[in-house]
Image (cartoon, coloured by chain):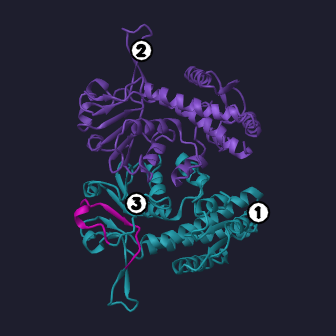
Chain colours: A cyan, B purple
Amino acid sequence: MATIIDGKKISKIIKEEIKSDIDILIQAGIKPHLTVILVGDNPASHIYVSMKEKACKKVGISSETIRLDKSVSESILLKKIDMLNKDNNVHGILVQLPLPSHINEAAVIEKISPDKDVDGFHPTNLGRLITGSENTFIPATPYGIVELLKRYNVKIEGKHAVILGRSNIVGKPLGFLLLRKTKTGNATVTYCHSRTSNLTSITKEADILIAAMGQAEFIKKNMVKKNAVVIDVGTNRVEDSSKKRGYRLAGDVDFTQVSNIASMITPVPGGVGPMTIAMLLKNTVYAAQKYSLKVGN
Amino acid sequence: MATIIDGKKISKIIKEEIKSDIDILIQAGIKPHLTVILVGDNPASHIYVSMKEKACKKVGISSETIRLDKSVSESILLKKIDMLNKDNNVHGILVQLPLPSHINEAAVIEKISPDKDVDGFHPTNLGRLITGSENTFIPATPYGIVELLKRYNVKIEGKHAVILGRSNIVGKPLGFLLLRKTKTGNATVTYCHSRTSNLTSITKEADILIAAMGQAEFIKKNMVKKNAVVIDVGTNRVEDSSKKRGYRLAGDVDFTQVSNIASMITPVPGGVGPMTIAMLLKNTVYAAQKYSLKVGN
């Protein structure tokens, strides 16, 4: 049986570390503040936003959610962001995705000041991830994954990391992090996706396998090398009449099967999920620290 | 014997295409202009810059090279770039790398307006490559490689592309291009580098093998799968007393050996090299087209 990588436990430790960073900022007269923009009434988005609000409160970050009707025009949304960019009391800005289809998501993300882009989705911040600039926000999910690997002393250098899924939010930035010339980098990185041929022959080669394609229990035992480290980014709802709510949460990995062959594995829930929120908080504090340096506090 | 991918021939065709784009711009009253900044006296940089000047002239792009002493301060260089950013007659700006060690290369690159960054090295442009924005400059070498694959009808979708070398200029951006959800994308992409273990077992899996690590004739026959397409980005000097100048140019691939097993291969010289210059010209014209759209010509 594999060692369980306990994201819940690690995220708690990180939140404690964040609290002491916040104390220092508050002593300098700066209360870190996150503004979230939520457009429309997507139920999942509402749940995510309220989770973020709660998490902020718990560590001492002030947060505010601006709720806009789903019919809001792109230009009004862009103006709102511009105001927040200029507001010195706002250190982090997050626009909850997805946006209604009449709004150009890329234009909205590019409007956020790169200095306040705590999601790390702005092209300038993604680009800095490639150039290896320290002065960037790392998207929360890949950031959390690297943190888990680090805190569980997983050797990354020289290992073959296979990433399933090429999203701009998880897969791609995770690859850059694992490629960096650092202690938590220097991996050989393979990106697989829906068009990949002979998928199993590639996943079988992975020392570190990261599943982020959003298909419930897709990764089976026969796809995993013995003693691989398996990171499961998926959170899928699977019908389950035995549950009161009618479904259960499942990752992209068949946990029951794969936990018998992997050396380490993240569970769903309690693996990558809690880390994502913790790293968002860390990014918000980093934004406030950047501001503090700028004003010389 | 493999088909030779003739970069010289294709680059000529592209330059002809560029000329007709330039004609349209000139009719609209815009003469595309590239300003190159060359700091210090690195002999290779001088050769590259003069090649770029010549190529501009040949297609009808006006160009100018600002030569600065190697002792120039970073702040003067940044001010110079700022002036060029504001100059409406300058459509493309290129700072020849490497810079002297007292200058922060990343800061210099970030100073160039993303709209004039014809090298495509600005983080905002690299980031847009990831998000798939059309509104970006693709770094010339990877851009040229994709163009070669396209014009030789190499099937990319679903194929395994293995890239040796993780530079910000070639390896990394090439990977994003091959990962895009386009006809010249949808490859499975593996990045290998100096820290990769079992390199041969990975290169042997490549349908498309791209060598960009700067080691003369490193790729031998035993590292290549039969009928692979092999792209050689290296340009290395190898001592050769039989040559008048005392050396010969060699790629990262042992051409004599590998051309017997590959289905297609780029030679050195005459493969990727000429394409790099052609794509720089294309980017400069694109910068002028962007400007033309902005001013409404």
Q: Quadrant of the C terminus of chain B?
A: top right
Seen in the picture, residue A14 relative to B76 is either above or below; the reply is below
Residue B236 percent across, percent down from the top left: 42, 24
Q: Quadrant of the N terminus of chain B?
A: top left
Residue A219 located within the stretch drawn in magenta: yes
Q: Secondary structure at mark 3?
A: loop
Q: Chain of mark 1?
A: A
Residue at the spot x=41%, y=61% of the render? A149
Q: Is B33 displayed left or right of B174 in the figure?
A: right
Q: Secondary structure at mark 2?
A: strand
Residue at the spot x=42%, y=32% of the render? B233
* Residue designated by label 2: B247
Residue B230 percent across, percent down from the top left: 33, 35
Residue A111 percent across, percent down from the top left: 67, 59
Q: Quadrant of residue B259?
A: top left
Circles 3 and 1 on the same subunit = yes
Span highlighted in magenta in the image: A217-237
Q: Nearer the viewer, mark 3 or mark 1?
A: 3
| Residue B157 or residue A268, whichever sits in front | B157
Whether residue B94 is visible, yes or no, is no
Q: Is A38 displayed left or right of A267 in the figure?
A: right
Q: Amino acid at mark 1?
A: Lys
Residue B150 located within the stretch drawn in magenta: no
* Residue designated by label 3: A165
Circles 1 and 2 on the same subunit = no
Q: Nearer the viewer, mark 3 or mark 2?
A: 3
| Residue B290 or residue B180, whichever sits in front | B290
